[in-house]
Structures are given as C-alpha cells and as structure tokens.
Amino acid sequence: MDTPLQVVCPHCDAINRVPAARLGDGPRCGECRAALFEAKPFALSEARFRRHLKHSGIPLLVDFWASWCGPCRAMAPAFEEAARTLEPRLRLVKVSTEEAPQLAAELAIRSIPTLALFAGGREVARQAGALPARNIVAWADANAAA
C-alpha cells in the first residue's frame, strides 16, 4: 500500500494527504481545488513557512532572499528553473528576510541568498550564495537523499 504524504496547499495552506506514487499526477487541493504543484516557487510569510514546515511530508527547499539583493534577484530565474525539475519531489519556496526578519534571525541566516533544505521539520542542509539552476538541482538532490 502506498503511504500518503501530507502536502500543504500553496494557495490556501490546507493540509492534503496524497499517495507518494501520485505526487506527479497533478493532485489538487481538497479544500480550494487548486493544483498542489505548479512547478514554480511561491512566497511564504513567517507564519505560512512555519505551517508548511510543520505539516509538509515532502522536503522544503527555501530561498532566503531580499528585494535589495542583486545576487538574490540574479538567482531568482535559476530557482524557478530548478522548481520545474525538482517538484513534486521537493517543494520550492521563497522567504523574504525583509518581511520575516525574526525568522531569519532565528535560523541564523547571515548572508543572502541562502538556500536551506528542510526535511521532517528540521534543517538538513544549507548553501549560501547564488547558484545556477543545474547546481541548485544537484545540491538539492544530493542533500535530500542524505
């Protein structure tokens, strides 16, 4: 029997149970009916980040960034490209350190952009600095499997 995973809706934050083998079949939210995966990153506030972190059955790859940061803006298209490859195995999200300074301090985000990979509610890997899409995918795959 295929064990269901919890997937938090990127639109309404409802918690959905999806069989692991069906993640790539275009599952929709049971609450708002929107697609659970759109192969693109989405922004999370501090409260929404905490909800996704607590309830997600798939790893979260987080881009901590700021609007004034040139390297962050330069890496944004690469992060979007990586989402097309990594979803639905991983959920890619963006958290603005300007909008969530308390969270950034709590997680000791010292430079941006910083990629952090979370699995099972805890951080498992971190990478500072802008990366091209292929390096984001390789880094995420290597650390998600560990």
Image (tube, rainbow, N blue to C red):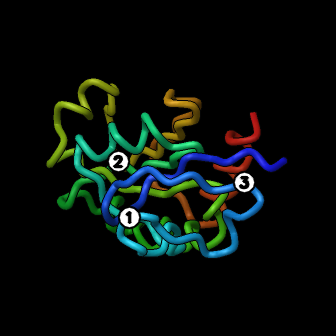
* Sequence-first tag of 3 and 2: 3
Given residues 9 and 92, the one toward you in this image is 9
Q: Position of residue 3 (x, y in %)?
A: 74, 45
Mark 2: which amino acid? Answer: Phe
* Sequence-first tag of 1 and 2: 1
Residue 73: quadrant of the picture: bottom left
Q: To which residue does mark 3 refer? A: 20
Mark 3 element type: helix
Mark 1: which amino acid? Answer: Glu
Q: Residues within 10 Å of mark 2 (few under 14, many from 20)?
A: many
Residue 89 visible in this rendered orientation of the protein: yes
Label 3 to label 1: alpha-carbon separation: 19 Å
Q: Residues within 10 Å of mark 1 (few under 14, many from 20)?
A: few
Which callout, 3 or 1, points to the residue nearer the camera?
A: 1
Q: Position of residue 99 (x, y in %)?
A: 15, 48
Given residues 47 and 108, the one toward you in this image is 47
Whether residue 51 sits left or right of residue 5 in the image: it is left
* Sequence-first tag of 3 and 1: 3
Whether residue 146 sits left or right of residue 31 in the image: it is right
Mark 1 element type: loop
Q: Are marks 3 and 2 in contact (CB under 8 Å)?
A: no
Q: Is residue 81 above or below residue 114?
A: below
Rendered image: mark on residue 31? 1
Mark 2 element type: strand
Q: Position of residue 51 (x, y in %)?
A: 34, 40
Residue 100: quadrant of the picture: top left
Q: Residue furthest right?
A: 1
Q: To which residue does mark 2 refer? A: 64
